[in-house]
Amino acid sequence: MEHLDKNEQKIYDLLPKGIDRPRPLKELEKLSGLKNREVRGIIYRLIVLHHVPIGSQYKRPNGYYVITNNEERQQALAPLTSQIAMMSKRAQVIGNVELENEE
């Protein structure tokens, strides 16, 4: 993992290891003193730039966690791949739909 800046390290340190007790976004905001958008941006950077395997769980208990095994990886990937497929289909339809004022 590359060198993390102060806020990246702060968020990383707040993330639980494993899926058992994920930490909700609101709790990360409160504990870090950062705003929602900042926390989400840091989580994105931790994953994409620093290759930290962070998963998120949408059902209760919901929140973010550091992935520690392949089962957790699969649980984190399932909603992402589903969302990608849905967004791809939506983009395809929007790109191909006939517009009312097209001639």
Image (cartoon, helix red, strand yellow):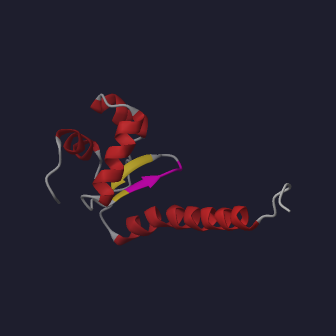
| Residue 19 percent across, percent down from the top left | 38, 55
| Residue 77 percent across, percent down from the top left | 46, 66
* Residue 18 sits in quarter: bottom left
* Residue 92 sits in quarter: bottom right
User: In the depicted view, which residue is nearer to us: 53 or 16?
Assistant: 53
Location of residue 43 with respect to 68 vertically, above or below: above
Q: How many marks?
A: 0
Q: Residue furthest left?
A: 3
Can residue 18 be found in the magenta stretch?
Answer: no
Location of residue 102 with respect to 92 vertically, above or below: above
Q: Which image quarter is the N terminus in?
A: bottom left
**At 60% across and 68% down in the image, what residue appears?**
85
**At 50% across and 62% down in the image, what residue appears?**
80
Left-right relation of 49 to 4: right
| Residue 101 percent across, percent down from the top left | 85, 55
Location of residue 84 with respect to 41 vertically, above or below: below
Left-right relation of 98 to 94: right
Q: Which image quarter is the C terminus in?
A: bottom right
**At 39% across and 67% down in the image, what residue appears?**
73
Q: Main secondary structure of the magenta part?
A: strand
User: In the depicted view, which residue is nearer to us: 16 or 50?
Assistant: 50
Q: Residue furthest front?
A: 103
**At 27% across and 62% down in the image, what residue appears?**
51
Location of residue 7 with respect to 92 vertically, above or below: above
* Residue 8 sits in quarter: top left
User: In the depicted view, which residue is nearer to us: 77 or 72?
Assistant: 77
Left-right relation of 97 to 18: right
**Which residues, given as a range, are shown in magenta?**
55-59
